[in-house]
Image (spheres, coloured by chain):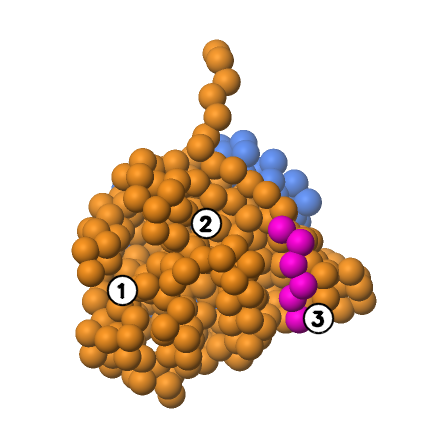
C-alpha cells in the first residue's frame, strides 16, 4: 500500500508545489513493518522497506496495521479519517522532531492519505 | 454577469469590554426572534453565512453574529502587541452578555459551535433567564489536549497553515469542497496565537464536567446537535452531556463534522429548522 506513495504524491502537482520547502526522511510503521520515506523539495524520491538496523529519520509515525487499513479506506469511519483523529485516540504515535511534521501538516496528511485513491479495500 | 448582494448587513460597534475600548464587527440578516450566533475557536462570524442567506431562517429570525475581539474584522484592544491572548470563561461570558445588552437583545435564542457551544453550557447554567433557548453545536463539557498547543504559535510553524491543517480532518467527509475550504480559509486567516488563546478556554479553563448536570432545562430549553465525524467533541461526549441533563434534546448528525453550519449548510439546516420551529412554538 505505502509503496504507492511515490507515484501518487509525485503525480499531484499541487501537493508537490506546497511541499517545495520540504526535504526530509521520515519513518512510518504499519504494525511490525517499517518504511523510510525520503522527500526532496516536495517529491517522494524513495520509499524503502525495512527491517532496518539503524534507521535515521526526522520523525516517526507508528500505528497498528488495522488502524492504517481503516485510515486508508475510501470512506474511513469516524475516528479513522485523519492523522489527528488517530493521534486523539492515542492509536497513532508521532515521535521525533515534530516541528517538521507540524510545519508541513497539510502536506503529510494529504500525502499519507494517497493510498485511498484506489478505493483501498480493507 | 451582474452583481448581486446578500441580505447581510455588517457594522462596527464601539463597546467598552473588560474596562477597555473595543471595536467589534457585527453582522445580521432577517427579522423576528433574535438568534445570536457564536463562532468556533480561531474563526469568525462568517461561519454563519448560510443561516443569514436562508429565507427559511431569516423570515422569522433576526440572525446576528459578531466576531469576537481578536477575530475576523474585530480588532484586539489597544496594547495587544505586548500581551498574550487567552480566553477565559469569565471573559467570554461577560463579552456575550455585554454585546447582547448593547444590541438590546431581549432573550435571544443563542446558537454556538465548539467553544461557542461550550460557553452556552456555562450560560445555560449561570444565566438561563437571559435566553429563550440554547442550541449547542459540537458542545461537550471538556476536551483533553491531544497535541502540543505550542505548535499553534511559534515562528518556525506558519500559524494559519497549521491551524487549518489541525482542524481540516474535523470537517465531515460529505462537505462540498467550496464550503470545506471556505471554512478552512477562515482558520488560515486567524491572527498569531488567537486559535491557541481560544483553546485555553476550550481545553483548560472552560471545563464544566462537574457542573453541567445542574443545568435546568425548565428555565432554558437546551438542544445539542453534533456531527458524527467530530473527533474533537465526539458524539459520545455530546451524548454524555445530554444524558446528564434532564429535558435536554440531542441529535447526532450523520456525515457532518465539527463545523456543521459552515462546512455543509445543506445537510445541517434540515437538523436546525425543526429545532427553531419547536422553540418558536413554545
Q: How many marks?
A: 3
Identified at 37% across, 66% down, the residue is: B131
Please report, as a chain letter, where disc 2 is located.
B
Residue at the disc numbered 1: B223
Q: Give the magenta part as a residue range.
A: B13-19
The correct choice, above or below, for A33 with respect to A4 in the image is: below
Q: Nearer the viewer, residue B93 or A9?
A: B93
Q: Nearer the viewer, residue A60 or B263?
A: B263
Residue at the disc numbered 2: B64
The correct choice, above or below, for B76 with respect to B176 in the image is: below
The tag earlier along the polypeptide, 3 or 1, is 3
Mark 2 touches mark 1? (CB < 8 Å): no
**Any magenta on residue B16?**
yes
The lab-note entry on whether marks 2 and 1 share a chain reads: yes
Q: Colour of chain A?
A: blue
- Across and down, in percent, residue B115 comes to 46, 65
Please report, as a chain letter, where disc 3 is located.
B
Secondary structure of the residue carrying numbered label 2: strand
The tag earlier along the polypeptide, 2 or 1, is 2
Amino acid at each position: 500500500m505505502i509503496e504507492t506513495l511515490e507515484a501518487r504524491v509525485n503525480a499531484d502537482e499541487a501537493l508537490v508545489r506546497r511541499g517545495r520547502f520540504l526535504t526530509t526522511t521520515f519513518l512510518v510503521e504499519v504494525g511490525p513493518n517499517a518504511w523510510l520515506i525520503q522527500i526532496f523539495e516536495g517529491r517522494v524520491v524513495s520509499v524503502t522497506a525495512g527491517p532496518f538496523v539503524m534507521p535515521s529519520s526526522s520523525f516517526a509515525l507508528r500505528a497498528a496495521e488495522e488502524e492504517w487499513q481503516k485510515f486508508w479506506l475510501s470512506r474511513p469511519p469516524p475516528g479513522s479519517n485523519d492523522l489527528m483523529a488517530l493521534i486523539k485516540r492515542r492509536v497513532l504515535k508521532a515521535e521525533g522532531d515534530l516541528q517538521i511534521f507540524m510545519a508541513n501538516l497539510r502536506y503529510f496528511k494529504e500525502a499519507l492519505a494517497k493510498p485511498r485513491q484506489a478505493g483501498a479495500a480493507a | 454577469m451582474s452583481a448581486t448582494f446578500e441580505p447581510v448587513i455588517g457594522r462596527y460597534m464601539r463597546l467598552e469590554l473588560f474596562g477597555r475600548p473595543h471595536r467589534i464587527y457585527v453582522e445580521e440578516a432577517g427579522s423576528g426572534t433574535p438568534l445570536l450566533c457564536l463562532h468556533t475557536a480561531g474563526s469568525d462570524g462568517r461561519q454563519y453565512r448560510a443561516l443569514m442567506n436562508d429565507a427559511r431562517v431569516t423570515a422569522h429570525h433576526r440572525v446576528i453574529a459578531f466576531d469576537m475581539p481578536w477575530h475576523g474584522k474585530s480588532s484586539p484592544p489597544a496594547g495587544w502587541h505586548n500581551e498574550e491572548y487567552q480566553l477565559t470563561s469569565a471573559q467570554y461570558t461577560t463579552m456575550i452578555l455585554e454585546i447582547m445588552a448593547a444590541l438590546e437583545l431581549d432573550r435571544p435564542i443563542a446558537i454556538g459551535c465548539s467553544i461557542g457551544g461550550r460557553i452556552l453550557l456555562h450560560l445555560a447554567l449561570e444565566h438561563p433567564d437571559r435566553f429563550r433557548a440554547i442550541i449547542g453545536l459540537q458542545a461537550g463539557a471538556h476536551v483533553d489536549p491531544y497535541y502540543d498547543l505550542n505548535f499553534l504559535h511559534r515562528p518556525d510553524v506558519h500559524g494559519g497553515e497549521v491551524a487549518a491543517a489541525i482542524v481540516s480532518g474535523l470537517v465531515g467527509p460529505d462537505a462540498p469542497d467550496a464550503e470545506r475550504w471556505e471554512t478552512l480559509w477562515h482558520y488560515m486567516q486567524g491572527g498569531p496565537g488567537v486559535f491557541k488563546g481560544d483553546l485555553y478556554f476550550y481545553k483548560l479553563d472552560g471545563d464544566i464536567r462537574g457542573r453541567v448536570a445542574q443545568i435546568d432545562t425548565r428555565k432554558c430549553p437546551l438542544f445539542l446537535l453534533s456531527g458524527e465525524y467530530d473527533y474533537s467533541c465526539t458524539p459520545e461526549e455530546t451524548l454524555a452531556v445530554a444524558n446528564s441533563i434532564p429535558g435536554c434534546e440531542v441529535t447526532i448528525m450523520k456525515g457532518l463534522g465539527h463545523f456543521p453550519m459552515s462546512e455543509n449548510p445543506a445537510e445541517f439546516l434540515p437538523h436546525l429548522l425543526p429545532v427553531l420551529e419547536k422553540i418558536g412554538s413554545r
